[in-house]
């Protein structure tokens, strides 16, 4: 994924998995925001954590989803692939993959979006 695609994923996680709200979608904003407010100078949205590349930020996503004790989280590091799995109360797995252990945050974010989007559909009666 490109840096811009990763930042778009970060913003999607910020809104859909963390439930914090909209975040900057401008891509790889590094200097285009106000250090006082944390707001992007272009779109005015908050600049969000780097969930897809920072393991500390990604772990907040794991903690948020597993706040519900019916959810499990499994991280499997294979020799050439890292797999992140959120398992819901029905035993359904939502999986994300990355090429290397160092990219575990990306796997976590992809699994989290799969999980929260599926469950958002169920909540709206569109799946289940
Ligand atoms: Zn922005």
Image (tube, rainbow, N blue to C red):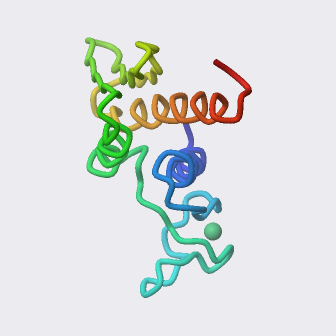
On screen, residue 11 versus residue 105, left or right, reads right
Is 104 placed above or below 35 here? above
Q: Position of residue 48 (x, y in %)?
A: 47, 62
Is 26 placed above or below 107 here? below
Q: Position of residue 117 (x, y in %)?
A: 60, 34
On screen, residue 82 versus residue 109, left or right, reads left
Is 15 placed above or below 66 here? below
Is 61 placed above or below 112 here? below
Residue most extreme to the right? 126
On screen, residue 59 versus residue 16, left or right, reads left
Residue at left offset 35%, top offset 46%: 64
Q: Position of residue 71 (x, y in %)?
A: 35, 28
Which quadrant of the figure has residue 86? top left
* Quadrant of the picture in which ligand 1 is shown: bottom right
Total numbered labels: 0
Q: Quadrant of the C terminus?
A: top right
Residue at left offset 55%, top offset 45%: 9
Q: Quadrant of the N terminus?
A: top right
Which quadrant of the figure has residue 120? top right
Residue at left offset 45%, top offset 24%: 96
Q: Position of residue 111 (x, y in %)?
A: 46, 28
Which quadrant of the figure has residue 43? bottom right
């Amino acid at each position: 994924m490109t840096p811009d695609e990763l930042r778009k994923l970060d913003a999607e996680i910020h809104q859909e998995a963390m439930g914090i709200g909209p975040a900057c979608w401008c891509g790889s904003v590094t200097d285009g925001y106000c250090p006082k407010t944390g707001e992007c100078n272009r779109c005015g949205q908050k600049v969000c954590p780097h969930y897809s590349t920072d393991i500390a930020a990604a772990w907040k996503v794991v903690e948020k989803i597993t706040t519900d004790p019916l959810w499990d989280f499994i991280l499997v590091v294979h020799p050439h692939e890292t797999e992140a799995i959120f398992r819901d109360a029905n035993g359904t797995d939502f999986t994300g993959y990355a090429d290397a252990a160092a990219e575990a945050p990306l796997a976590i974010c992809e699994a989290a979006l799969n999980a929260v989007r599926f469950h958002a559909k169920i909540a709206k009666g569109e799946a289940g």
